Image (cartoon, rainbow, N blue to C red):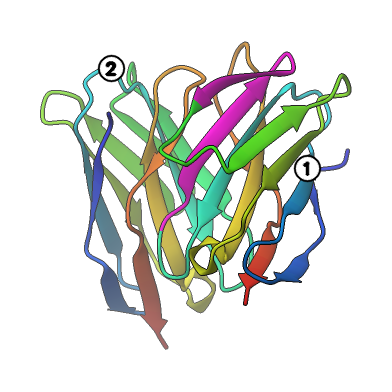
Amino acid sequence: DAGVTQSPTHLIKTRGQQVTLRCSPKSGHDTVSWYQQALGQGPQFIFQYYEEEERQRGNFPDRFSGHQFPNYSSELNVNALLLGDSALYLCASSKQTGAETQYFGPGTRLLVL
Amino acid sequence: GENVEQHPSTLSVQEGDSAVIKCTYSDSASNYFPWYKQELGKRPQLIIDIRSNVGEKKDQRIAVTLNKTAKHFSLHITETQPEDSAVYFCAASSLNEKLTFGTGTRLTIIP
């Protein structure tokens, strides 16, 4: 039973570029949440996807967008990258009905130069 | 929105002693409180969680207590071991909603 997977593991971009991060949820899970974790801080909620729709959004600008596919996998897109977007991006999956437990993937470490 | 405060930010204990980390939350609608352990460069891993209809939960050396009236919950680790060294995060959420995390506690176990 595969856990949550994310790709790529590391990424280096320059300011102004665009990036796409990918997440595959744990088997049996249908909900994907994305978090940004800056160095030395706790994860900050970006948004959550369920049934291919954005259900809830945190305090992030429209440069951050996402998508969920019919197989429940998800993408996080960030446009017009800023230096401050450098962080660990974590994907967490859960089941919409029943337990609220969110399981995290290994993350994608993004460095913006 | 929800706000979670976590204390202390750093904690050093002798191996074999107990460690306690405390969190407070602001939103009375929150009903789910997980604790995550994050080792350097790795993903947050769920170590224990508690729901608002339960006051205490224990799993071997780890326990969590919840006081809904005071809006605070605590993580207790007994008989600490070197492998317990990590950053610990508390979090709070409502049913299937976003997790709001505390700022983390860096726990160091001194051999």
Q: Quadrant of residue A65?
A: top right
In the image, B56 versus A35, the foreground residue is A35
Q: Is residue A44 magenta?
A: yes
Q: Chain of mark 2?
A: B
Q: Quadrant of residue A67?
A: top right
Secondary structure at badge 2 equals loop
Give residue B55's position: percent from left, percent from top: 28, 26
> Which kind of residue does numbered mark 1 sit on?
Cys
Q: Is residue B81 magenta?
A: no
Horizontal relation, residue A111 to residue B25: left or right: right
**Residue at numbered disc 2:** B29
Neighbourhood count class around disc 2 (C-alpha, 10 Å): few under 14, some 14–19, many 20 upward? few
Nearer to us: label 1 or label 2: 1
> What span is colored magenta in the figure?
A42-56
In the image, B79 versus A59, the foreground residue is A59
Q: How far is mark 1 from mark 2, CA to CA?
A: 29 Å
**Quarter placement of the N terminus of chain B:** top left
Residue A104 appears anywhere in the view: no
Q: Give the residue displayed 60% in from the left and 61% down from the top.
A: A88
Q: Give the residue displayed 84% in from the left and 30% down from the top.
A: A27
> Which kind of residue does numbered mark 2 sit on?
Ala
Q: Chain of mark 1?
A: A
**Residue at numbered disc 1:** A23
Neighbourhood count class around disc 1 (C-alpha, 10 Å): few under 14, some 14–19, many 20 upward? many
Q: Main secondary structure of the magenta part?
A: strand
Give residue B8's position: percent from left, percent from top: 22, 64
